[in-house]
Image (cartoon, rainbow, N blue to C red):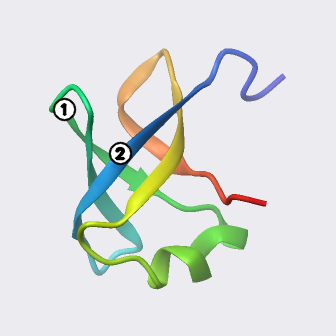
Amino acid sequence: MPGENAFKVEGVVVEVMPNRTCWVELANGHRVRMFATRKARAALAALSAGDRVRMQMSPYDLSEGRLILES
């Protein structure tokens, strides 16, 4: 089942890239690449540097995460 071991983290957007990704700095100082699923791409387009975001990360790849929409 996908997402079974995933965990959620919060961070601050540092830079928005033109290829529908952005760099996010976590509370511990690490920078990770964040991407958005097809449903969340509109929310990603509205982000700018300094915005706080929540994302889901896999314990197997700690270099990137997926944007979580607040509902």
Query: Tag 1's secondary structure?
Result: loop
Query: Tag 2's secondary structure?
Result: strand
The residue sitting at 21% across, 25% down in the picture is 28
In the picture, measured across the screen, residue 3 lies left or right of residue 16, that is right
In the picture, measured across the screen, residue 27 lies left or right of residue 64, that is left
Q: Is residue 3 above or below residue 23?
A: above
**In this orientation, which residue lies closer to the viewer: 16 or 26?**
26
Q: Position of residue 35 (x, y in %)?
A: 46, 57
Tell me where residue 71 sits by quadrant: bottom right
**In this orientation, which residue lies closer to the viewer: 30 or 20?**
30
- Quadrant (top left/top right/bottom left/bottom right) for the N terminus: top right
Query: Mark 2: which amino acid?
Result: Gly
Q: Position of residue 44 (x, y in %)?
A: 49, 74
Q: Is residue 19 above or below residue 45?
A: above
Query: Mark 1: which amino acid?
Result: His
User: According to the image, label 2 marks what residue?
Assistant: 11
Q: Residues within 10 Å of mark 2 (few under 14, many from 20)?
A: many
Residue farthest to the left?
29
The residue sitting at 41% across, 73% down in the picture is 20
User: According to the image, label 1 marks what residue?
Assistant: 30
